[in-house]
Image (cartoon, rainbow, N blue to C red):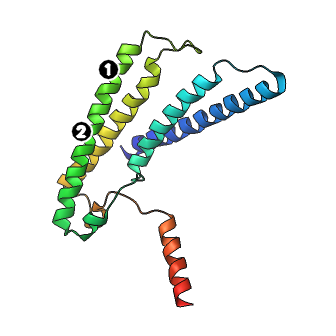
Amino acid sequence: MKTVVDAYFWLLRAIIAVLLAVMVVLVFGNVVLRYGFNSGIAISEELSRWLFVWMVFLGAIIGMRERAHLGVDSLVKVLPPAGRRICYGLSHALMLYASVLLTEGSWKQTVLNWDTVAPASGLSLGLFYAAGIVFGASSCVIILHELYRLLTGGIADADLIAISESEELPQASEAAHGKSQA
């Protein structure tokens, strides 16, 4: 099962890389054509905006798995392990509720706009809203897995703080201690 999950996240990263490359080509090509040849790619702005939305939603799925989203942990850090478990479960239950709402709303928007076409590209607007379905469904699975781990005791007390430290924090703290000791 771990292999399938790792393959899914590898695929997400590959799709994000392709989306970014296509966005760069579209935007850069459009700029060159506008300033160099007084023309442009008609669908460039619309398509690059859609690709950006998809890239953000897919990146948010990866961020969810890696616990890379922003959060405030000052209260949770001072709680005993039982309090941390309660806060962890409560926060994940609320995230699950929000993800279900997002998935349901995205589904409704996708179905509602499936027959509507975008002005420049002629693509179905349902494709735009489908990004929310992919994110919502994926995040629900991730959150449910984390809740399962919590309920079965598969999460260590040290992992009950559901956010990761900033990469800059340890460096800033080392720099501050180095300057104060000098």
Residue 118, percent across and down? 52, 15
SS at mark 2 in the image: helix
Q: Residue at x 67, y 35 (%)?
A: 24
Residue extending furthest bottom? Answer: 182
Q: In the visual, does 146 lie left or right of 169?
A: left
Q: Residue at x 27, y 61 (%)?
A: 160
Residue type pointed to by label 2: Tyr
Residue 5, percent across and down? 40, 42
Q: Is residue 144 visible?
A: no
Q: Toward the viewer: 7 or 124?
A: 124
Q: Residue at x 20, y 52 (%)?
A: 89
Position of 3 relative to 79 (above/below): above
Q: Is residue 51 visible?
A: yes
Crowding at dot 1, Cα within 10 Å, few <14 / some 14-19 / many 20+, comes out as some
Position of 11 relative to 26 (above/below): below
Which quarter of the rendering shows the C terminus?
bottom right
Q: Residue at x 41, y 13 (%)?
A: 114
Residue 143, percent across and down? 29, 45
The image quarter containing residue 57 is top left
Q: In the visual, does 139 lie left or right of 28?
A: left
Position of 127 relative to 78 (above/below): above
Position of 27 relative to 7 (above/below): above
Image mark for residue 108: 1
Q: Toward the viewer: 179 or 2?
A: 179
Residue type pointed to by label 1: Lys
Image mark for residue 97: 2
Count all numbered tags in the image, as a single digit: 2
Crowding at dot 2, Cα within 10 Å, few <14 / some 14-19 / many 20+, comes out as few
SS at mark 1 in the image: helix
Q: In the visual, does 145 lie left or right of 38?
A: left
The image quarter containing residue 86 is bottom left
CA separation in Å, label 1 and label 2:
17 Å
